[in-house]
Amino acid sequence: MLAISITADALFSDSQAYSKAEFKPTPNHLFTSASFYSFLYVFIFTFIMGEGFEQIHFCINHPTVMIDLLVMSVLQVVGQISIYYVIVNFKQHIFPLISTTRKVLTVLLSILIFGHHLNGMQWLSIFMVFGGLAY
């Protein structure tokens, strides 16, 4: 999953530069467009798979989950607007740098907090990623 994410970050940075120069979108426009198409895709897919009514039934039977969903939604909105702010106001290569750094730091914190054991090749991989970011 990490390899797919990093590859996608690398492949889409030039298309972001083109879109930014050609269409001059605002962070709010990017956020609204991405959210609309994500909602449409998830809504259609959920009901085609027959899980939409189960989810609604679960929320009705467990109303406290709505607080968690609301908090998660607000945090996602703040995160997405931050991402689009970076894309619009900085060069297209900055966001993949920020995103990759965050992913690697998340892995390192998980290793430290939960005491995961890494072998030499795994540590070498982590150092290679940080080396690539520094380069």
Image (cartoon, rainbow, N blue to C red):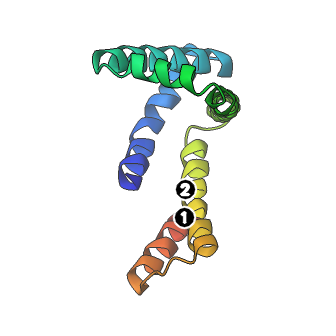
CA gap, disc 2 to disc 1?
6 Å
| Amino acid, disc 2 | Lys
Secondary structure at badge 1 equals helix
Front residue (pair 119, 6): 119
Q: Quadrant of the C terminus?
A: bottom right
Q: Position of residue 29 (x, y in %)?
A: 62, 14
Q: Position of residue 118 (x, y in %)?
A: 46, 80
Residue 89 appears in the rendering: no
Front residue (pair 53, 105): 53
> Up-down: is 17 above or below 57?
below
* Residue ranking furthest to the front: 61
Instruction: Name the residue at 43% across, 45% down.
Output: 10
Q: Which residue is mark 2?
A: 103
User: What mark, if any, has residue 107 been given in the picture?
Assistant: 1
Total marks in image: 2
> Up-down: is 80 above or below 130?
above
| Amino acid, disc 1 | Val
Instruction: Name the residue at 39% across, 42% down.
Output: 8
Find residue 14 and report its image quarter. top left
Residue 90 as seen in the image, left or right of residue 21: right
Front residue (pair 19, 61): 61
Are dots 2 and 1 in contact, CB under 8 Å?
yes
Decide: few, some or many residues near mark 2? Use Cα within 10 Å; few <14, some 14-19, many ≥20.
some
Residue 79 appears in the rendering: yes
